[in-house]
Image (spheres, helix red, strand yellow):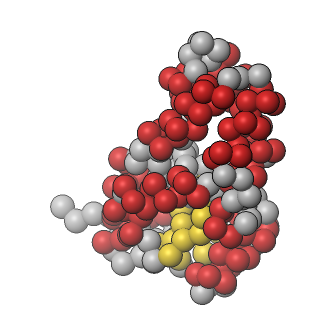
Amino acid sequence: MKIVFDFGGVLFNWQPSRLLRREIPEVAHDEASAALWVERFFQGYEGDWGEFDRGRLSIDELVPRIAARTGLGLHEVQRVVDGVPHELQPLADTVTLLRRLRDQGRELFFLSNMPEPFAAHLEREHDLVGWFGDGVFSARVGLVKPEAAIFELAARRFGAAPADLLFIDDHLPNVQAATACGWGAIQYTNAAAVATELSRRGLLRRDEA
């Protein structure tokens, strides 16, 4: 069984409300206003941000589109976009789990909706990306989760039948899409819960004392 990780919200921190409160506190000044601006800014990762994820927009094209759509200033939108790499910090508990799986010889892959500038940043700044045998970033293939086509492409690229792939993602529609494509799937809530489920499936041994 090959284990496939999502990145944002699973292996790397992704809390967009915190990002907006940090970068544009003039409008995202508390939990309620931040939640509203998350929806306005990212549009559920559809719209212009979805095109960014898909590799169809550059940052220089994205920023004025979001500014025009939301009424934010160009400099405010730019601050948010520039702040994303800082937000994408490794989650220590998942890194520990990933290391255990690697050390136990599990085949590891990734499948992530990720714009090209941030994909390149993660590859450049975090050696753990090299722990994976291969991976798919959405911007590099022009497809995004939860589209079936990206799961089909990933299975071909990873050289596995869907039934031999187990996907770990925090976003339920992506988990459901993977399942519909014949993959196994676990919805990520925290690393400990995933470790328990992997152990139950015989994919993770207890660490030796």
- Image coordinates for residue 94, horizontal then vertical, percent: 41, 52
Residue 119 lies, with reference to residue 149, above or below; the image says above
Q: Quadrant of residue 167?
A: bottom right
Depth order, front residue of 208/166: 166
The quarter of the image holding the C terminus is: bottom left
Residue 208 lies, with reference to residue 47, above or below; the image says below
Depth order, front residue of 68/33: 68
Depth order, front residue of 152/77: 77
- Image coordinates for residue 64, horizontal then vertical, percent: 73, 36
Which residue is found at the position 58% from the left and 21% from the top? 24
- Image coordinates for residue 109, horizontal then vertical, percent: 51, 71
Depth order, front residue of 6/78: 78
Which residue is found at the position 47% from the left and 38% from the top? 87
Residue 27 in sight in this render? yes
Residue 140 lies, with reference to residue 7, above or below; the image says below
Drawn side of residue 73 relative to residue 135, left or right? right
Which residue is found at the position 30% from the left and 72% from the top? 103
Drawn side of residue 31 relative to residue 42, left or right? left
Number of numbered tags placed on the structure image: 0
Q: Quadrant of residue 39?
A: top right
Residue furthest to the left? 209
Which residue is found at the position 59% from the left and 33% from the top? 78
- Image coordinates for residue 7, horizontal then vertical, percent: 53, 55
Q: Quadrant of residue 36?
A: top right
Residue 175 in sight in this render? no
